[in-house]
Image (cartoon, coloured by chain):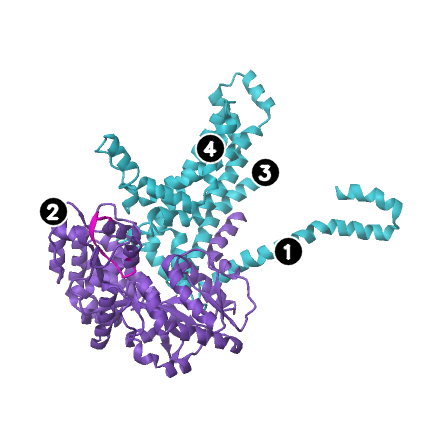
C-alpha cells in the first residue's frame, strides 16, 4: 500500500499543493495577486504598484506560492482555478494566458482598455496574448527580448574586439577571445538556455522573415529547409567556444563569468542585465549590450503579464484598479528600469533608462513598426508549451551530441513538432 | 484487552443490555477512529488512481477534457519506448530508471548492511558514529543534490581540488557529461540513504535472540558463517521493508535528479517522474502525463506484487 501511496503522492503532488492554498474570503477592497517576484529589485519595483493601489484604497494581498520559480506558481494557479477560487490576477507567461482565456477562466477588461487606448500603445504582436476573441483579459507588464549579447568591456578592449555585425564577425570575435585565453562564450547548458540561444541563431542565419515562417507559421518547408540546417550547423559552431563544464549551469552563473571577466560574452535575454546592475556595473562603462549579430532591428520577445481572472462582480472594481495601475506610464517606467526589460507600452519616455534600456525601447518601437517583433519559440511565445517543449528537446539533444547531424536534427524537429500538435 | 478491563466494572454498575451496548461501542471504537483516514486514503489515493487512469484515456491538455479517445496516449508512449536514436525522452526515462533504481537499491542495501554489521561489533563510540551515518537523511534531497553537484563540478569541486594537490591528469567530469550524469545522481542518492538503511539493519541485528547465536557458537560456527547462515536469513523482514522503502524512494525521486543535473541538459537526465511532471504541468499534455503515471504504477505493481505475495504466503504457512 505504501508504494502506491507514494506513487500517487508524486502523481498528485502538485495539485495537492494547490488545494492546500486556503480559500480566502474575498474582500472587495482587496487585490489578490499571485506572482513570484518576491525578492530583490523586482519585489521593490512591485512595491510601487502596491503603493499606487493603496492610494486608491485597495489593499494588496500576495497569494503565497511555495518555491521561487514560475513553474510551481503555474501549478498552484491551475489548482486554484480548478477549485473555483481564482486570485484577482496572476503573473502569467506566454501561452498559459491563452489556455486560461480559451477555457473561459479569464475576465473582461475591454471597457478600460478601450477608454485608455491600450491597443494603440501595446505592440500588435503582443496583443495576441492579452486579447482573446476580441476581449482584453490580461495586461503586459514588460517586454523582454532574447536576442541580446552581453560582453565584458574590459575583456573586449584587451582583445581589441569591435561590435560584431554578422554571424561570421561573431565567430571571428570568439576566436580572438580564445586566442587571448579567455572563455569566449559563457553558456549554461540547460535545455531552455540552449533553445533561447538557438532562437537568435535562427533569426541571424535565415533572417527574421524566415524565423516567422518556421516558428510562428510552422511551415514544414521552412522547418526542413537548408537554412534551418545551416542554423543548426551554426549552433554547433558555437559549442566549440564554451568551456567544458557548461552542462547544467544556471544562467546567472554564466552571467557571473562575464561579469568577473572569465568569459567574454553571454547570449541571453535582457534579464541578464539585472545581474550586471546588481554587481554595480554600468552599461557602456563596464559591460556592453549588442543585439545578437545579424538580428539588429528585430526583437524576439517574451513578456510578463498579469492575467485578470473571472472574479465575482464585487471584486471587479479592485481588478480594474490593478489593471489601470499596471498600465500607468509611471509604473511601467519604474518597474522596467529595475527589471532590465522595457515597458510594454511604447509611449513611455526613456529618460530613466540606461544605455541598454534606451536601445531596447528604440528597438521595440522600430521592430513593431517594421513587423520584426516576434515571439520567442524557446520562451513559449511562438507556439504552445507542447511544441516549445519538443523544440527544447531537439535543440538540447543536438547540442549535446545525441542527435549527430543537422540533417537528422531537422527531421527530428519536424517529427517532434508533429507529435506535440 | 478492552473486554478485560471493562467487563468487571460493567457487571457491578450496569444492567446487562447497556453493558453490551457499551461493549459494542468499545469494540467499534478502533474502527471509528480509523474511518476518517481510511476514507481519506480511499479518496485521495485509490480515487485519484482511478481518476488518473480515466485521464489517460482522454485528450486532456492544459485542463481536463472529458472526451475519451481510447488508447492513443498509450500508443504514443509505446512508440517512444523503442525510439533509441536519438533517444526519446520516454526511452531515456526508462533506461535511467533502471540504472538509477538498480544502483541505488543495491548499493544502499549492501552499504547499509556492511555498516550495520561493522557498527554492531560492540565498538567504542557507537553513539557517536551512528548519527554521523544517519545524518544525511536529515537533509532534503534538493540540498543533497545541490551539494553533490557543486562537489562533483570539475571547475570548482573534486577535480579542481585534486589538480591543485598536484595530480593534474585526474579527470572526473561525470556531472557535466550528460551520458554519465545519472551515475552522479545515484552516488548522491546512495550517500543520502545508506545510513538510513544501516539504522534499519542495526535495529534488526539488535533484535536477534542472543541464545541462537550462542548455540551457533557452541556448534562451532565461524563469524562469517554465522552471518551468512543465521543472522542475515533471520533479518529477511528487514530486507523486505528496506527494499520497499528504497524502491519507492527511487521511483518517486524527482528533486534529486533535477538538482544534481541542472534541469536535464541534453535530455539525458530524464526519469519517469520528471517526464510525468513536465508533460502534465509544463507541456500541457495532461493525458500523456497521466498515461506515464499509470505505466509507472503498473511497473511497480509488477515488481512488488509477486514479492509481497511470496513473503506473505510464507508468513501464513
User: What is the display colour for chain A?
Assistant: purple
Earlier-in-chain disc, 1 versus 4 = 1
Up/down of B239 relative to A185, above or below: above
Mark 1–mark 2 Cα distance, whole angstroms, equals: 71 Å
Q: Residue at x 49, y 46 (%)?
A: B304
Q: Residue at x 45, y 36 (%)?
A: B194
**Dot label at residue B132:** 4
How many numbered marks appear? 4
Q: Alpha carbon of mark 4 to alpha carbon of mark 3: how far? A: 35 Å
The chain letter for the residue carrying disc 1 is B
Q: Chain of mark 3?
A: B
Q: Secondary structure at mark 2?
A: helix
Colour for chain B in the figure: cyan
What residue would you read off at disc 3? B315
CB contact under 8 Å: marks 2 and 4: no
Q: Residues within 10 Å of mark 4 (few under 14, many from 20)?
A: few
Callouts 2 and 3 close, C-beta under 8 Å: no
Mark 2 lies on residue:
A179
Q: Which label sits in the foreground, 2 or 3? A: 2
Q: Nearer the viewer, residue A40 or A82?
A: A40
Q: Secondary structure under badge 4?
A: helix
Numbered mark located on residue B36 in the image: 1
Would residue B17 be counted in the magenta stretch?
Answer: no
**Is residue A264 within the magenta segment?**
yes
Residue segment shown in magenta = A260-272
As helix, strand or loop, the secondary structure at mark 1 comes to helix
Residue at disc 3, secondary structure: helix
Mark 3 or mark 1: which comes first in sequence?
Answer: 1
Locate residue B180, reporting x and y percent.
Answer: 30, 43
Q: Where residue B116 sits: x, y (%)?
A: 48, 29
Residue A276, position as x, y percentages in the image: 27, 55
Amino acid at each position: 500500500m505504501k508504494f502506491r501511496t507514494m506513487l500517487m503522492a508524486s502523481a498528485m503532488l502538485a495539485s495537492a499543493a494547490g488545494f492546500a492554498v486556503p480559500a480566502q474570503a474575498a474582500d472587495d477592497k482587496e487585490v489578490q495577486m499571485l506572482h513570484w517576484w518576491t525578492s530583490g529589485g523586482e519585489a521593490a519595483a512591485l512595491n510601487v504598484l502596491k503603493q499606487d493601489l493603496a492610494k486608491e484604497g485597495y489593499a494588496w494581498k500576495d497569494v503565497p506560492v511555495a518555491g521561487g520559480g514560475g513553474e510551481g506558481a503555474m501549478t498552484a494557479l491551475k489548482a486554484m482555478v480548478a477549485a473555483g477560487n481564482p486570485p484577482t490576477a496572476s503573473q502569467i507567461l506566454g501561452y498559459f494566458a491563452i489556455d486560461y482565456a480559451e477555457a473561459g477562466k479569464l475576465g473582461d477588461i475591454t471597457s478600460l482598455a478601450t477608454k485608455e487606448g491600450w491597443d494603440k500603445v501595446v505592440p500588435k504582436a503582443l496583443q495576441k496574448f492579452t486579447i482573446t476573441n476580441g476581449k482584453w483579459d490580461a495586461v503586459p507588464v514588460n517586454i523582454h527580448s532574447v536576442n541580446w549579447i552581453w560582453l565584458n568591456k574590459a575583456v573586449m578592449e584587451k582583445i581589441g574586439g569591435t561590435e560584431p555585425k554578422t554571424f561570421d564577425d561573431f565567430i571571428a570575435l570568439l576566436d580572438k577571445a580564445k586566442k587571448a585565453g579567455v572563455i569566449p562564450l559563457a553558456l549554461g547548458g540547460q535545455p531552455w538556455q540552449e533553445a533561447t540561444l538557438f532562437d537568435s541563431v535562427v533569426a541571424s542565419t535565415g533572417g527574421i522573415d524566415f524565423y516567422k515562417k518556421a516558428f510562428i507559421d510552422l511551415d514544414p518547408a521552412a522547418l526542413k529547409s537548408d537554412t534551418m540546417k545551416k542554423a543548426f550547423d551554426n549552433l554547433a559552431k558555437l559549442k566549440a567556444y564554451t568551456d567544458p563544464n557548461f552542462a547544467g549551469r544556471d544562467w546567472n552563473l554564466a552571467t557571473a563569468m562575464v561579469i568577473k571577466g572569465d568569459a567574454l560574452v553571454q547570449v541571453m535575454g535582457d534579464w541578464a542585465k539585472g545581474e550586471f546592475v546588481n554587481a554595480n556595473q554600468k552599461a557602456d562603462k563596464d559591460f556592453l549590450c549588442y543585439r545578437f549579430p545579424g538580428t539588429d532591428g528585430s526583437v524576439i520577445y517574451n513578456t510578463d503579464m498579469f492575467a485578470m481572472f473571472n472574479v465575482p462582480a464585487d471584486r471587479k472594481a479592485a481588478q480594474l484598479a490593478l489593471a489601470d495601475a499596471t498600465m500607468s506610464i509611471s509604473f511601467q517606467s519604474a518597474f522596467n528600469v529595475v527589471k532590465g526589460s522595457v515597458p510594454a507600452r511604447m509611449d513611455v519616455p526613456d529618460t530613466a533608462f540606461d544605455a541598454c534600456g534606451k536601445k531596447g525601447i528604440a528597438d521595440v518601437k522600430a521592430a513593431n513598426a517594421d513587423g520584426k517583433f516576434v515571439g520567442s519559440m524557446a520562451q513559449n511565445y511562438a507556439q504552445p508549451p507542447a511544441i516549445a517543449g519538443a523544440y527544447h528537446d531537439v535543440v538540447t539533444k543536438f547540442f549535446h551530441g545525441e542527435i549527430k547531424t543537422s540533417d537528422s536534427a531537422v527531421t527530428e524537429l519536424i517529427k517532434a513538432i508533429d507529435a506535440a500538435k | 484487552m478492552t473486554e478485560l478491563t471493562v467487563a468487571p466494572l460493567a457487571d457491578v454498575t450496569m444492567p446487562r443490555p447497556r453493558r453490551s451496548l457499551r461493549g459494542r461501542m468499545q469494540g467499534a471504537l478502533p474502527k471509528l477512529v480509523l474511518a476518517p483516514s481510511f476514507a481519506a486514503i480511499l479518496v485521495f489515493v485509490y480515487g485519484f488512481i482511478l481518476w488518473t487512469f480515466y485521464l489517460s484515456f482522454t485528450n486532456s491538455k492544459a485542463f481536463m477534457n472529458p472526451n475519451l479517445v481510447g488508447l492513443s496516449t498509450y500508443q504514443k508512449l509505446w512508440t517512444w519506448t523503442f525510439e533509441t536514436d536519438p533517444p526519446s525522452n520516454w526511452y531515456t526515462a526508462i533506461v535511467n530508471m533502471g540504472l538509477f533504481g538498480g544502483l541505488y537499491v543495491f548499493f544502499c542495501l549492501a552499504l547499509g548492511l556492511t555498516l550495520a554489521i561493522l557498527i554492531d561489533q560492540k565498538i567504542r563510540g557507537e553513539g557517536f558514529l551512528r548519527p554521523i551515518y544517519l545524518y544525511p537523511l536529515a537533509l532534503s534531497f534538493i540540498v543533497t543534490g545541490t551539494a553533490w553537484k557543486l562537489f562533483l563540478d570539475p571547475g570548482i569541486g573534486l577535480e579542481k581540488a585534486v589538480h591543485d594537490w598536484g595530480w593534474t591528469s585526474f579527470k572526473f567530469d561525470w556531472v557535466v557529461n550528460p551520458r554519465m550524469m545519472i551515475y552522479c545522481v545515484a552516488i548522491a542518492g546512495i550517500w543520502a540513504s545508506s545510513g538510513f538503511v544501516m539504522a534499519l539493519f542495526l535495529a534488526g541485528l539488535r533484535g536477534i535472540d542472543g541464545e541462537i547465536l550462542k548455540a551457533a557458537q557452541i556448534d562451532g560456527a565461524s563469524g562469517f558463517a554465522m552471518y551468512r547462515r543465521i543472522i542475515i536469513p533471520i533479518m529477511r523482514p528487514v530486507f523486505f521493508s528496506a527494499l520497499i522503502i528504497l524502491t519507492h524512494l527511487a521511483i518517486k525521486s524527482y528533486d534529486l535528479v533535477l538538482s544534481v543535473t541542472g534541469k536535464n541538459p541534453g535530455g539525458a537526465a530524464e526519469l519517469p517522474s520528471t517526464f510525468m511532471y513536465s508533460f502534465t504541468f509544463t507541456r500541457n499534455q495532461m493525458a500523456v502525463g497521466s498515461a506515464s503515471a499509470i505505466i509507472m504504477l503498473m511497473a511497480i505493481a509488477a515488481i512488488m506484487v509477486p514479492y509481497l505475495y511470496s513473503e506473505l504466503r510464507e508468513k501464513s504457512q
